[in-house]
Image: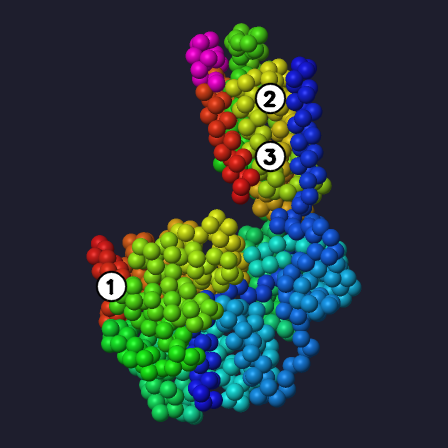
Amino acid sequence: MSVACWRVAAVALALAGAPAQAHKGSDALWNLTAEGARLEGRLEVALADVELAVGLDADGDGAVTWGEVKAREGVVRPWLRRGLRVRQAEGPCTIELGDVFLTRHSDGVYGAWPFSARCPAEVRALGLDYALLFDVDAQHRGLVQVAGAGGGQWRAFSSARRHLEVELATPPPLEQLRVAFAEGVRHLAIGVDHLCFLLALLLPSVLRRQGAAWVPLPSLSGVLLEVTKVVSAFTAAHSVTLGLSAFGVLAPEARLVEVAIAASVLLAALNVVFPVVTEGRWVLAFGLGLLHGFGFVSALTDLGSGGGRLWLSLLGFNLGVEAGQLVAVALVVPLAFAVRHARWYARLALPAAGAALVALATWWTVERLAG
Amino acid sequence: MQRNAAIALGATLSVTAAVVLAPGGRTPGRVAPASDAEVVARVTPRRAPDVPRDAEAAAAEAQRLVTRARREGGDVRLLGQAQVVLAPWWSEAAPPPAVRLMRATIKQSLHDFDGALADLDALSADVTDVQAQLTRATVLTVLARYDEALAACERLKGQVDVVVVVTCQAPPWAIRGKADEVAAGLERALTATPKASPLRPWALSVLGEVRWFSGDGAGAAAALREALALDDTDRYSRVLLAEVLVATGRAAEVPPLFAGRPLSDAELLAFVESGAAPREARAELAGRVEASRRRQDGVHRREEARYALAVEGDVALARALAVENFAVQREPADARVLLEAALAARDADSARPALEWLARTGFSDPRFVALGRALRALP
């Protein structure tokens, strides 16, 4: 075959549609959250990109081990550090990167470095410079997300745009409280698992266990005491864990939390059908409620930190959740109270509702385990 | 406190503690290697940073990267690396031809069709530069400038095998309603092409596409399968074959096409659209789409529009993306997603550019004709 023909063949192959099915280019991810004059966050760069820029694969066998990643920290971290600059009108911020860990993304494993910066003044506006990898991949993008700025949108650095100005929207405190409150109400209203959990604990609260049978509680005050104990225990428990995870003290794995929450609904519902804990159901509300607090934290994180007033968002969100809870109580408890003397309530309605909740919670548990 | 309650409290607190202490917390998607020896990434070992100074060597290095990019499903990383190799000439008005051709090829791959065409127009003055003519014909076809595309193919005559000219001209002619004649011409040209010719897979892939344009599903599938048998890395043919199989009620044949191999975005999307993809494939695609949207560079608008329409059922988003996409590239697949999205949104107006394209070309693919009719029948 002639040389010209071979070249045509190469082009022909090359032309076979490649542009239309391009796959993801190289992205680095940079998250930032402002807390007063401090910035906290994380920088994630694909290991394949780190290899390309500064090398990781010491033995050149095409396989990067965790040991090789750690061994190159002394070179990689200064390289990352040189590629980033953060400043505000008052002057530059001092950047620090923590020890590398690994995260998985759709296009492979990334190195992740905890990022922190100290700025001269409270952070309201930032100038960000990013220059990593453009010298080896002209299509690289540095994607930055600043909590509280631009509605959580990602913004992109490219080889043509290596500087971004970011303004942090800090709402007035009352507005921040209102938004967080509304989010709390909304989160409980759409969080069917939380409501089902509460339902499983509240439905029997108009009754008392006597031997192997349910008997109605005589007075409203007795019922209200029981309901208050359950609701207060649930509130106390999820407030504690929500607070602890919001401030980063505890951070369990999100998927595991979702499974545990589904399982907690299952346990509470089983306790309706086969009563084991018949006195002091508030204990269940407390013990299992701890798990639910971890489940609330993602919604709170999405609200942003409100410029160093995380506690205000936390307060508003929690109040919103409580308000939603009280509405649920106001809908369920009076109804149950009204019909508590009917024999069908204890014998039929309660076990049936319990069984339905068991079925639903079993499905959730299985689904979340599989997912 | 009741004894059971006390036990329950103890048990629930233990569960909570277990959840808190379980590994993998802190960061979603965190990977915890079991030991230092664990392999955490497969990479292409880094080569010595030898950015070529002379144009011929740089063009050859860029070509090597671009060819690899295409084999690996249009890897944008490799295209970006090729761009870096050409950096000294990237902004030059008239770089040496070899560099200029690669610059045009990279721009085309990144959907900068106007930029690519400017380079290719300049290069095509040299009629002996067959690659430039051929690439130019492809770009012009993507831009729906069929007369110019055919003229570009015409200039190849006498310089290359007949099958190259026929294959070059096949898409613009087929789009203009001559799919049957074009398929016959391709079949004749293929008969005269040696079995071992590296041109065969390309010609077969185009034959499959052209047969599909005329509604011949069985013929299209046969040609595409033959193309894939000769060139396993031809992702374009694989995606088209999946589409043909699904549309002709043979979706059961789709999974073996995709199972057990790394898939490009378009392949993964075709797999998921076939309805036969496992849950992991759907999750993988969702992750890739999210990542692609984050990049905001619009290179994947066609795929994003299809995803919004067929997977997410977000008609408004699909329509917006399809409209944007058709303003940049106007291949039949781009027209199709615009027609389908507009029909789903019951909004013939936004499909007007695709309807005009359909009327102007006389494109006779029965599915497109039906879509056009349905849209025009909207109140």
Q: Position of residue A99 (x, y in %)?
A: 75, 55
Kindly identify which numbered label has been placed on residue A86. Answer: none
Determine which residue is flagged by label 2.
A230
Q: What are the residue bounds of the magenta stretch?
A: A337-351
Q: Does dot 1 land on a helix, a strand or a loop?
A: helix
Q: Chain of mark 3?
A: A
Q: CA distance from mark 3 to mark 2?
A: 19 Å
Q: Which amino acid, mark 2?
A: Val
Q: Is the residue B25 above or below the residue B153 in the image?
A: above
- Label 2 CA crowd tier, 10 Å (few <14, some 14–19, many 20+): many
Quarter location, residue B129: bottom left
The subunit carrying tag 1 is B
Position of residue A164 measured from the top left corner of the image (x, y, whole percent): 61, 64
Q: What amino acid is at disc 1? A: Pro
Q: Residues within 10 Å of mark 1 (few under 14, many from 20)?
A: few
Residue A237 at x, y percent in the picture: 65, 29
Q: Residue at x 56, y 76 (%)?
A: B65
In the image, A351 versus A179, the foreground residue is A351
Chain on which label 2 sits: A
